[in-house]
Amino acid sequence: MPIVVDAAPVPHLIAKKMLGSETLPSSPWVNAMLPGLESSIPHWHGAGLSDVGLLRSSNQDAFLVDNDLGLWVVADGMGGRAGGNIASSLTVKALLDHFHHSQENGEPFLFEQSNGEASFELRQAIQEADAAIRQRALEDPALSGMGTTIVAMQVSYLAPLQVVIGHVGDSRAYLCRGQELRLLTRDHSLVADLLARGHIAPAEAASHPQRHILVRALGIEGQTDPDISNQAVQSEDILLLCTDGITNMLSDREIIAHLTLAAESPDEACKGLVVEANSQGGKDNSTAVVIRFS
């Protein structure tokens, strides 16, 4: 289930909030102040795309793109045709509802949160998604065992520009700066654990027979604690959130090649990643959310 919210240019919305006018400017001084404020505010634009792939009969991925909130989410559901789709959809809806509710209640001004405040908010939102999945499974025993991965990112501060990232499972966040691609998350998978402990070599991980086994996911058992991190962002940085349907099919070099398109169009970068995943076999659902900062 894709959710895309992109109603107005982000700097324009932030400038109006800074002036205490979230409605359209209604006085000459607000109109006069907006251009100067907008020019000093970082810009970003995110886009997303999801595809069922070539071998699966249904798409259990979901994503959220809310450029107004500076919030982006990718979730990869599991637990049968119906269960996986429901779990991932509940997750993106729970995060969107949480942050909209926070803003409506006048909680810390958007994009002016300390690292601790931003980490707390995102952790709480992910745990609410976890609880929503488990509650839905209790109400419908046919959905027992459904779960989902999640990787979520939100702009937390503007000067200097910071994002907070939360994840559970093996959906990933990457930073592309120039021609360097850096993984910002660590998979919660059996193979990642074996690799970290030195029990297998990196070359073995890609083809390991247990590479799809997760050790942490939303909705499975008890409350799941997400990994939370903060990341400084620069102008011209590109960030990618994606499911393993992308990373299992594309090399880092191929990912970089498509992300360079984001300098012109995040939409085209997403399309390129998904099309490339399908051209190499499309063995799984594939979802990419690409965000360009300027």
Image (spheres, grey):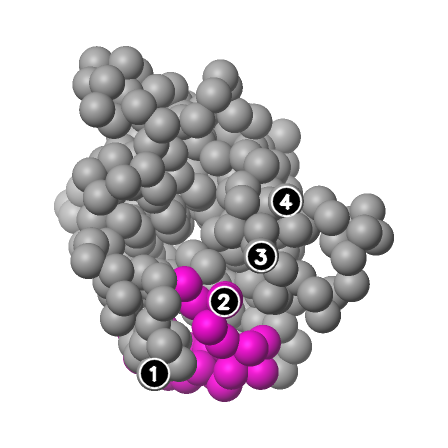
Q: Earlier in the sequence, mark 4 or mark 2?
A: 4
**Residue 278 image point, x, y percent:** 32, 76
Place of residue 166 in the rendered image (x, y in percent of width and height, measured from the top left): 53, 41
Give, as a three-letter code, the residue at label 1: Ser
Q: Which residue appears at 75% of the width and 53% of the height?
A: 195
Amino acid type shown at disc 2 = Asn
Badge 2 density bin: few <14, some 14–19, many ≥20, Cα 10 Å: some
Element marked by disc 1: helix
Q: Residues within 10 Å of mark 3 (few under 14, many from 20)?
A: few
Residue contact at pointers 4 and 2, CB within 8 angstroms: no
According to the image, label 4 marks what residue?
190
Q: Answer yes or no: do the residues labelled 4 and 3 have beta carbons within 8 Å?
A: no
Q: What distance separates the C-alpha of mark 4 from that of mark 1?
A: 28 Å
In space, the residues marked 1 and 2 are separated at their CA atoms by 13 Å
Cα gap from disc 4 to disc 2, whole angstroms: 15 Å
- Residue 128 vertical position relative to residue 57 in the rendered view, above or below: above
Residue that numbered label 3 is attached to: 209
Tell me if 268 is positioned left or right of 23 in this view: right
Residue identified by numbered label 2? 248
Magenta stretch: residue 182 in it? no
Q: Main secondary structure of the magenta part?
A: helix
- The residue wearing badge 1 is 279
Label 3 is placed on what type of residue? Answer: Pro
Going from N to C along the chain, the mark reached first, 1 or 2, is 2
Whole-angstrom CA distance, mark 4 to mark 3, is 11 Å
Q: Is residue 216 above or below residue 39?
A: above
Secondary element at tag 3:
loop
Which residue range is magenta in the image? 245-268
